[in-house]
Image (spheres, rainbow, N blue to C red):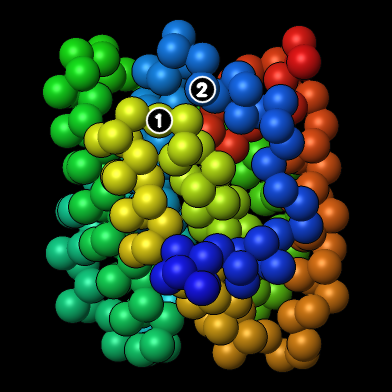
Amino acid sequence: MTDTQQLLDPILEFLPCETPEEWIAEAIKPENLPTLLIDHCNNELKAAQSAMSIAGRYRSGSASKQSEVKRNCEKKAASTALNLMYRYTGHFQLLNKMSRLAREELRHFEQVLTIIKKRDIPYGTLSASRYAGALRKHVRTWEPARMVDTLIIGAYIEARSCERFHKLAPYLDDELKKFYLSLLKSEGRHFKDYLTLAESLSEESIEERVAFFAKVEREAIESADETFRFHSGVPATA
């Protein structure tokens, strides 16, 4: 068994479904490559900011201070947020994991940005896909349940990203194929980190919530989507 397959098997076991072939067919159209890369680039930055936002909620201090840090992390680039890490004094496992993940995601953001620039693709903002929002609208509103749900959602986003890296790789040029397979290797265990942290913070078994979000995730992936994005569902025209 190859190293790639060893990483991929737990991801496929965790995810409720594989990416539909209709999405793959849409993603590999030459005209969709700029959208794919730009959305991927934006997602890497969002992942870094999300990791820092999670860390910000668990710094020591009052609830108002936690909310303030969360808002700041969402507004600032992840590189700026990383400078705040020295202030955090509690929940060492979560902070350490999120700090490392944020640095890694930010490095991947820079790598995708370099590829975009090399290919003379105009970089700009894109509207977000409905994928993450479809998951996050079910997050519970009280702690620690809110954080547990957030971490479980993070696990699904990371796992789905890796599954799509692998699905896309055979259809891409050599540079992108090598890059996407390298991302699978470096990010392939992130979903487990999120689940481990969710378990450590939860007051009860997380199995029920994992199963719940599996159903939501599957619906988002297999239902029709009007807009093509890295995490979009089946193209509405398919």
Q: Is residue 131 visible?
A: yes
Left or right, 93 with reference to 14? left
* Amino acid residing under circle 1: Leu
> Where residue 43 sits: x, y (%)?
42, 41
Q: Is residue 68 visible?
A: no
Q: Is residue 97 above or below residue 229?
A: below
- Residue matched to label 1: 172
**Residue 212 is drawn in which quadrant?**
bottom right
Q: Is 70 or 172 nearer to us in this picture?
A: 172
Q: How would you rate the neighbour count of disc 2 (Cα within 10 Å): few for under 14, some for 14-19, many for 20 or more?
A: some
Q: Is 56 or 173 nearer to us in this picture?
A: 173
What residue is shown at x 73% (from left), y 36% (from top)?
A: 20
> Where residue 160 sits: x, y (%)?
59, 51
> What quarter of the picture does the C terminus occupy?
top right
Q: Is residue 103 above or below residue 142?
A: above
**Residue 31 is drawn in which quadrant?**
top left
What residue is shown at x 44% (from left), y 13% (from top)?
A: 30
Q: Which mark is residue 66?
A: none
> Where residue 33 sits: x, y (%)?
41, 19
What residue is shown at x 20% (from left), y 42% (from top)?
A: 110
* Residues at marks 1 and 2 touching, judged by CB atoms closer than 8 Å: yes
> Where residue 197 sits: x, y (%)?
53, 81
Measured in 3D between alpha carbons, the distance from the residue under mark 1 to the one under mark 2, in whole angstroms, is 8 Å
- Residue matched to label 2: 28
* Amino acid residing under circle 2: Ile
Residue extending farthest to the front is: 1
**Residue 82 is drawn in which quadrant?**
bottom left
Q: How would you rate the neighbour count of disc 1 (Cα within 10 Å): few for under 14, some for 14-19, many for 20 or more?
A: some
The disc, 1 or 2, on the residue closer to the chain's N-terminal end is: 2
Dot 2: what SS? Answer: loop
Dot 1: what SS? Answer: loop
Q: Is residue 134 above or below residue 88?
A: above
